[in-house]
Structure formats: C-alpha cells, structure tokens
Amino acid sequence: MKIATVTAVVCTYNRCTSLQDTLHSLVTQRVSPGVALDILVIDNNSTDETKQVVDRWTTQSAWPVRYVVEPSQGIAYARNRGLLSAQGDIVAYIDDDAIADPRWIESLVACFNATDADMVGGKIAPLWLTARPGWLADDLMGPITAFDLGSARRQCTKTQEAFLTTNCALRRASATRFGIFDVTLGRRGTRWVGGEDFELFIRWLKQGATIVYEPTARVQHKIGPERVSPHFYRRWFEDVGYTQAHQLDWKWHYRLSIVPVWRWKKLTEAAVNYLRTRAGRSTDELKLQAELWWLFQRSFLKERIDHWFGKRACHFADAT
C-alpha cells in the first residue's frame, strides 16, 4: 500500500531548548505532492517550557503540530502514546535532541513504498557542539548516538542491526500485528536504563517483520558538553550495565555461573585494571577510562545477582 500520511513523533522530557531545533527541522520538511505530514509532540511530564515551545510552532508551521501529555513516566510509555495518538500510516520517531535532514520524511516514505517494509531505520550522525575530550577513546563511544550500516539500502536480518529510535519509522498497522514498546524497559526520568528500542526490533524481526535500512533517511544527533562529561559517562556506563544484564536471555547454567562464563573474565580484567590505575601513577584519563569499564561490568554483575536471587526489585527496575 502506498504511503499517503506520516506522523512524526517527538517524545520529550525537559528539553524545551533543544526541542526548538528538532521542531524546526520537522516543520521545514520537503515532501512530494500527495504526502501529508503531521507532527506530534509527546510530553512525558516536563516541568520546563515545553508546552509553550510547541504552542508557538502550532501557529508557525504549515504542517499540523499537536501536543499530547503522557503521564506515565518512561520513554516506552511515551513512544506507545505516540503510536496510539498518531494519524499517519507511518509513525516516524526522532529524538528531541536530533535534527532531521530536510528530506528525511521523503526518504522514509520512498523506502516504505519501494519495499513494503514494516519498519525502516536510517543513518544517525553525531553533530558535535563541543570538542571531543582526550579521554574519549574509540571503545567508549557508546553514549555518542550514531548509526550507519553503509550507503546501500538493505533488508536487516540480524539482531546486531537493531535500529535506534532516534531515527526509526514503523508502519502503524504493523504495530497491531507485531506489538508495541515494552513499558518495563526504556529510559525513565534522568536514568539511562533503556533497551525498549532494541527489544522491539528483535521481537518484530523474530515474528517475520520486514525491516529495512534506508541510508538516505538521515538525522543528526547533538553532542553537547554535558553529553561528554565524566558525570554523564559514569551514569551511562552504570545504567547500561544494568540494562544489558536485565535483558540477557536466560540459560540454565546461569543458575550456577550467575553470568555468562566469559563475563567473569571481563569483570576480572576490569577490576584489575581499575585497581592498577588507582594504585599506580596513571594519568587522570586512564583512571577515568578504567573506572567506566569497571562501573559497567560491576553493574552487569549486580543486576544478574538480583535475577539469580529472583528479586523483582532489581537494580534496573529501581532506576528512576
């Protein structure tokens, strides 16, 4: 079925300044005749001037701009509210700290029409608003939101190709068939536990959904000073450790080993390196790098111990 209508969804929480840039990139989208766009902002209990920002754009935009509050705290709740409140055949998600290419919607529509896909994801390029710190080694780039599967359109068949909802579009009818976001996962408040986008991708893929990567559907994700601060990185690595351990598929031998056997090696290496940098004359950069990996491995183990004991109030669930 040819796509005629698209709802661009922005889920937001206390980022009214950044939201301005995202909305500007959406209201200036250039689409082909016959394609209608509406813009939907899901406010997940912001306490800043988010509503006032959206109200200003409703009078300036040629496309309809709507504002909806989702009172249940959590990004998965907000994304589901976007699906339920959308009017378009396609629901295109973009984050409130991202900027869409002027032809973003056009590229998504072209891909859906050409492939009859259920889900389409595109490129995410970092938009550096600050200098990259010297301590930010290549293996620490996880918090720098980026996604690039190359320059050719292709169907995705592997779980390792999971899209980020910074740039991901769903056929609304397919959500009825394959399901919506798991509200037990996803970022909540200021904590960086997550996983709802990866879980949705994997679940749809296992159910036979057609998932396509479209390289011309591009967005930029802003990297400001706060995103590369040691404080942010410590919280991110700790929370992602909880997230990955929480989503680990169960295997019978974890009753004996608690975590995958190879994880014990990683944990030991991280602990030894952390202690070595503290005891020796390591630079501050090396100390921070070692600390981050220790926080990640330690969080992973703590979450798996919670699961091992059968605790419902695990570290992941308690993150708010």
Image (cartoon, rainbow, N blue to C red):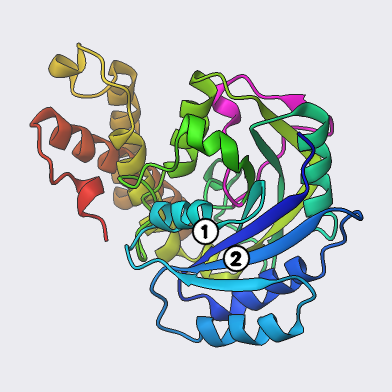
Give how far apart the Cα atoms at labels 2 and 1 are: 8 Å
Indicate which disc residue 40 carries: 2
Q: Is residue 114 above or below residue 20?
A: above
Which region of the structure is painted magenta? 145-166
Quadrant position of the N terminus in the picture: top right
Would you say residue 148 sits in the magenta stretch?
Answer: yes
Q: Determine contact: label 2, label 1, CB under 8 Å.
A: yes
Q: Nearer the viewer, residue 274 or 136?
A: 136
Q: Which residue is mark 1?
A: 85
Kindly identify the residue that appears in the image at 45 percent across and 84 percent down. Answer: 48
Q: Nearer the viewer, residue 1 or 224?
A: 1
**Badge 1: few (under 14), some or many (20 or more) residues near its Cα, within 10 Å?**
some
Horizontal arrangement in the rendering, residue 296 relative to residue 222 (left or right): left
**Badge 2: few (under 14), some or many (20 or more) residues near its Cα, within 10 Å?**
many
Would you say residue 304 sits in the magenta stretch?
Answer: no
Disc 2 marks a residue whose amino acid type is Leu
Indicate which disc residue 141 carries: none
Quadrant position of the C terminus in the picture: bottom left
Disc 1 marks a residue whose amino acid type is Ser
Q: Specify the quadrant of the image occupied by residue 98.
A: bottom right
Q: Specify the quadrant of the image occupied by residue 230.
A: bottom left
Image coords of residue 72 (percent x, y): 32, 62
Image coords of residue 260 (percent x, y): 29, 19
Kindly identify the residue that appears in the image at 52 percent across and 83 percent down. Answer: 51
Horizontal arrangement in the rendering, residue 2 relative to residue 73 (left or right): right
Kindly identify the residue that appears in the image at 58 percent across and 63 percent down. Answer: 10
Image coords of residue 92 (percent x, y): 65, 51
Is tag 2's residue or tag 1's residue first in the polypeptide sequence?
Answer: 2
Mark 2 secondary-structure assignment: strand
Q: Is residue 257 above or below residue 280?
A: above
Kindly identify the residue that appears in the image at 37 percent across and 65 percent down. Answer: 190
Mark 1 secondary-structure assignment: helix
